[in-house]
Image: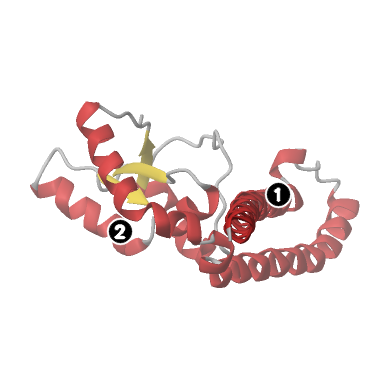
Amino acid sequence: MSGIDVQTQMTYQAHQEPFLSVVIDPIRTCAAGKVEIGAFRTYPEGYTPPDESPSEYQSIPLDKIEDFGVHAKQYYQVPIEIFKNSMDNAILELLWNKYWVDTISSSPLLHNRSFTNKMVQDCVQKLEQIDTASVSQSRFRMVMHEPKKRKEDHPLSKVSIDATKLASEQAQGLTNQVVKFALFKACQCKAQANSSAAAASTAMER
């Protein structure tokens, strides 16, 4: 969360307990085809949490890493589960009946072009940063005999995760477009065939 999010959550926790921050990423949700959601609470002011290795890597844009690092120790993620009841299913069915045309005709690849470009540029900047830092770090290890980091902690592994996730989302978007094209192409051919058959039948009757 950003510094503003952390301060807002701290304020509400101090005056309106219990209070929980729920964050939904609409762009990532659209790109991945599933709800990207998280829940957070802040630690009490002055509390220092123990150092723990993160259970799952989180992709953070380069321009937000500094802000994340400043506030990373001030909040923690709360496990969540998403479930639906009968009323949710009824509402979703109504929404689908209303917006199914937009859903089928829209393309995440087109809607998220700006976001995708930013993510590609972010990966490039991170790679350039690694390339610059790797030379000085290798020299430092030769002099100080510093042990190497674990493979999963290496910045290159993290960039690889970001790039793989982005490529997977693009592949999913392309697959959806291919399926839509094949579906509507088949419907169009069938409609043309029926129209031709009807025209031929009319001509024969005459």
- Depth check: give the residue in front, 109 or 95: 95
Which numbered disc flags the more N-terminal residue, 1 or 2?
A: 2
Query: Residue most toward the front?
Result: 206
The image shows residue 121, relative to residue 53, as above or below, that is below
Residue type of the residue flagged with mark 2: Asp
Q: Residue at x 38, y 60 (%)?
A: 2
Q: Position of residue 102 (x, y in %)?
A: 41, 59
Q: The N terminus lies in which quarter of the figure?
A: bottom left
Q: Is residue 145 left or right of residue 110?
A: right
Residue 130 quadrant:
bottom right
Residue 199 marker: none
Q: Position of residue 132 (x, y in %)?
A: 80, 69
Report which residue position mark 2 lands on: 5
Q: The C terminus lies in which quarter of the figure?
A: bottom right
Q: Position of residue 122 (x, y in %)?
A: 64, 67
Report which residue position mark 1 lands on: 164
